Amino acid sequence: MRVLIFGLGLNQGGVGSAKFFARQGAEVRVTDLKNAQVLKPSLEKLKSFKNISYALGGHKYEDIDWADLIIKNPAVKPGNPYIEYARKRGKSIEMDMGIFLQYVRPGQIIGVTGTKGKSTTASLIYEILAIHLRGEKMRLHPGGVVLAGNIGKSVLDTVRFIKSDTLIVLELSSFQLQAFREHRVSPKWAVITNIFPDHLNYYKNMKDYIKDKRAIAEYQKQVDFLFMKKGDPFTTKGREIYFSTNDLPKNFSPKIVGEHNLENIAAALAVGKTFGLDEKTILKTLSKFKGIPFRMELVKTWQGVKIYNDSAATNPESTIQALKTLPNSILITGGVNKNLSYDNLIEAIKQYAKKVYFLEGSATDEILKIKNEKLKIYNNLLKLLQDIKKVVRSGDVILFSPAASSFNLFQNEFDRGRKFNKAVDKIFS
């Protein structure tokens, strides 16, 4: 089979797809708009495969004609002319998630989606099940539990570890949920953390965004479960289970901070109880959870100054939540706008931020235009942190929460998070 990876990218999804098909003996070709220099981190991971060829720096119709199967990067927008060309010629088009769904059953999947909190919630659920599904409770799932999905690698990397009775905790972006719609399936256990505006540079409007999110429950059956906050615009044929921070004991004190993280914990608790696990035991595990990288991550304490990395905050609402959690912070924000409104963030900055520093980008331009202020804009994290170091005092909090995408200065939010941590280590040594 001739397999075309349409969009290699830098977030490891394309790499995982290329490896998966190359290992099975397919003839693989990789195409991407980016050139080899930009894609070097991904290409390095594929250099040992002799059956992978490359057509980089732009797409070509001849590559579409060549392929038997096209694996489309989830970030490829609807209406892409090359994908439309492929459809007209009857080509088989899938995302890596669509291939993954051919190897597993919906009854194995605990799917977690939402605009914010899905990574943390999926990780919390995984921790609970991996630690506490033992003995009789594990009888139905002796194949164990795996964590996969939108976590910085392809789901196809995990296929070899999954048996017919393995539980799979899947973090699912709206893009990945398109594959569930195409295959007309939904997870047996579906969790929705929250919904607010995001990715409006990809979707025409919120209606289209919510349509993709809705696939997580759209094809559920009466024996399935949908976990959500009360009032969310979703329904299911299965059992609806609501969660809130009121489900947690008043004296509950987790290591991860913020009201939004309490909601994530409440969601994980609800899922754990559905599996018949003891509530006190679940809460004990949840209280010890230290969080995941680049999501309100305390990366350093320097001379009484706490420095948090919230690089995964790629929309205004996420940064608003971070500011409310850490009021009076020195905020570092800015980046590429996804056609989102920054009006509420500006009000939050006025109310909660002690001082604000900006990284360059269209989101920053939008904020400063509304604020009608002329402030210094940075394109270098080292220089930015050096300037903050001159004014910071013991007891201050530095909060890196961009509220925007990163593609002008960084490969993605994970690259942005790693580079921020390295800059912190260098400046605050």
Image: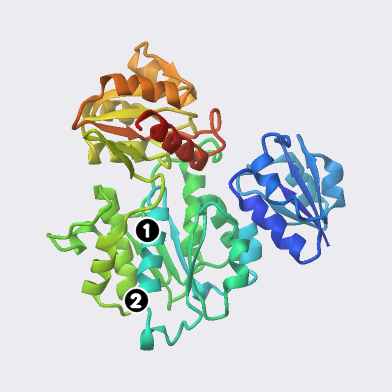
Please identify the quadrant where the N terminus is shown. Answer: bottom right
19 up-or-down from 39: above or below? below
For image coordinates 45% across by 40% down, the residue present is: 198
Residue 397 in the image: state x and y as whole percent.
Answer: 25, 33
Please identify the quadrant where the C terminus is shown. Answer: top left
Mark 2, Cα crowd under 10 Å, few <14 / some 14-19 / many 20+, is some
Q: What is the C-alpha distance between the residues marked 2 and 1?
A: 16 Å
**Residue in front for this viewpoint, 242 or 172:** 172
For image coordinates 22% across by 57% down, the residue present is: 245
The three-letter amino acid code for the residue at tag 2 is His
Residue 361 relative to residue 128: left or right: right
Looking at the rendered image, the disc whose residue lies closer to the viewer, 2 or 1, is 2
* Cβ–Cβ under 8 Å for marks 2 and 1: no
- Location of mark 1 (residue): 121
- Location of mark 2 (residue): 132
Q: Tell me the quarter of the picture where residue 359 sits.
A: top left
Residue 297 in the image: state x and y as whole percent.
Answer: 34, 45
Dot 2: element: helix
